[in-house]
Structure formats: structure tokens, C-alpha cells
Amino acid sequence: MLRRFLAGAALSALLLTGCGQDQGQDATVEIGAVTIVSHPSLDAIYEGFKEGLAEAGYVEGENLKLDFQNPQGDQQTLANITSAFASSTYDLFLTIATPPTQALAQAVTDRPIVFASVTEPVGAGLVDSMEKPGHNVTGTSDQIPPEQQLDRLQQILPGLKSLGIVYTSKEINAEFQAAAMSQAAKARDIEVKTVTVTDSAEVAQAAESLDVDAYWVGNDNTVVSAIESVVQAAEQKGSLLFTSDADSVVRGAAASLATDYKAQGVQTAKIAVKILRGADPATTPVEIQESLEFTVNPEAAKRMGTEIPADVLAQADNTV
């Protein structure tokens, strides 16, 4: 259970000093940022975050100091980063993905934490509710309704009978998405087969173990970082690969309905700016990034034994 953010007189004091004060554009703002692993979507969030801060007048090297850390999925390194950030005097923290947000939220309760790419912040124990977070943590969620993804997938494969889901058992956001997709697929009489991994080295074997019409991969940092392994299995088995990550389509998946992650970074920066200028994170709602993009890779689909229909291609926002 997360300790509650400063209450009563303590909260009032915070709002009058430090990060609760309107920082303006003259004072130098110091932000600690941490992601979980390198892959294009998470990298795009950080770039969008910096862009959003610059639009608000906070420019790195002028009135903004950014300390960006990446543990590359290593939990001990993440723990070390968390400890260093907790001991710092940074005004605010940016966390990208669920694991670093959970780690930092346990260690830092006296300064704001603004997250991005956290699919289920309530289930992850980060906020009391999307509307009223209740603590020092708020941000943006990359939730995508599974029904919308299935609509697109079934437009490509009208005869879809079985769906394989590879997900990371230790990531609450991955578990949440897998459960939601499983429920939605079963409601359409689609057989669902799932297999879990604990790290990226297990992804290839997990994907190869499934015999299904199509694979689905959600916003799962571990699996996405090894998406080429799922692509290879999909091509070998003649099974379509549909994802929640547009960059995975560039890397060989057949299609995706995905969040615009750079736009999410910009949106997250707007929340951070509000807080730097005096807003209380406890009452600043978590926002869902609404820009969804349908991306297709016709050649990748052909390698998986599927011809994407012309009317579906016409609906695509992006074609690889």
C-alpha cells in the first residue's frame, strides 16, 4: 500500500515551497526521469516529453535540468536509480512504464511523480482512481480498448478462431491487458491460448509454443523489446501478428492499433507543467491518450500467410 501524499498542514507547506510553488520560466527546474528499457515507443515518450516542456518554456540547458536513466530491464539497476532519485533534490520525476513508476512511488512520497505508458494505474496501486489519484502520483495511461483491436484484427482475418497471447507475468499492466483481451476474445467465441515470460530471452520459445490463427501482443515492454522473436514464429507458423505498438509493425508485425507515444509524451509534459506551476497531483486526473493509429504492413502480413483486404488498407493511418 503506498503511503499517502502529504496531508493537511504538511501539504499546504509543500504547495508554498519547492515543487508546489509556481516555478515560472526563470527558475531552473530539475527533473529526474527513468524508463524501464529501450524500445522506440518508450523512447518516443521521452522525446515528446522534452518537446512538451520546451513548448511551455522549459528548455534543457537553459532553465531545465533533466537526468534521464535507463536500467535496461535490470531490477537491481532500477533499485539503484530509485535510491539515487529519492536522495536527490529534484523538483519532479517522470517515470515511463509501470515498473519504474511503482518503484519510485514506494521511495518518493514528498515530491510529484508524473508517469507515462502505465496501462492500469489503479490496478498497479499507483492511484486511488483515474479521476482523483489521491497521492503524489498522476500521469497518462496508454489503455486501448481490446474490442477496438479485435474489430481491426477480424477485419483482416474474418475467420479468426484462435488467438495466442504472449505476455510478461511480472508486469501488472501486461497481466491486465492479457486478461482484458482474453475476455473480449472469448465473448466472440475466439479460443484464447496464453503463455507467460519473465524476460525477453524467453519470448521466442513462448511464441513458438503456440499454434493459433493469430498472435496478439499488448503494451508489454519485455515482449515488445523482443518482438522480432514473435515475428519469426508468426512467419514460420503462418499466423498473423497484431500488436498495440506501431513501431512493432515497422519491425515486422502485420498490423497494430496503437497509441501515438510521442503525443503521449507531449500530453504528459502538459500535466507536469501544471504541477510545476502549482497543481496538486492528488487531484490532477490521470489522462488516457486518445490518439490511436491504425498501422499496417502488407508485406509482413503476406509472409504470415495473409493478404490484408483492400478496404482495410484504405482505413490505415500508416502503411509500412
Image (tube, rainbow, N blue to C red):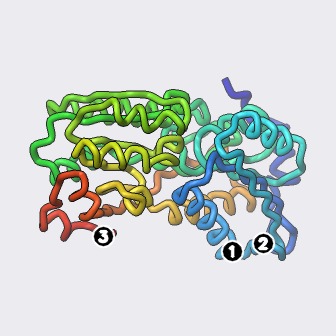
Question: Left or right: 271 with respect to 230?
Answer: right
- Would residue 111 be found to the left or right of residue 132 on screen? right
Neighbor class of circle 1 (other Cα within 10 Å; few <14, some 14-19, many 20+) is: some
Q: Residue at x 69, y 54 (%)?
A: 279
Contact (CB < 8 A) between labels 2 and 1? Answer: yes
Mark 2 packing: few (<14 Cα in 10 Å), some, or many (20+)? some
Q: Is residue 58 above or below residue 33?
A: below
3D distance between C-alphas at marks 2 and 3: 34 Å
Q: Residues within 10 Å of mark 3 (few under 14, many from 20)?
A: some
Q: Indicate the position of residue 300 as horizontal and vertical percent values.
A: 29, 59
Give the farthest residue toward the top: 1
Query: Looking at the image, is mark 2 or mark 3 nearer the viewer?
Result: 3
At 18% from the left and 52% from the top, the residue drawn is 305
Q: Position of residue 126 (x, y in %)?
A: 61, 35
Horizontally, residue 240 falls left or right of residue 221, namely left
Could you tell me if residue 155 is visible in this image?
Answer: yes
Residue to which mark 1 is pinned: 54
Task: Give the amino acid at mark 1.
Answer: Ala
> Looking at the image, can residue 7 be seen?
no
Provide residue 26's location: percent of width, then percent of height: 85, 74
Question: Which residue is rendered at x = 11% and y = 47% of the image?
Answer: 158
What is the number of the mark on residue 60? 2
Q: Amino acid at mark 2?
A: Glu
Q: Secondary structure at mark 1?
A: helix
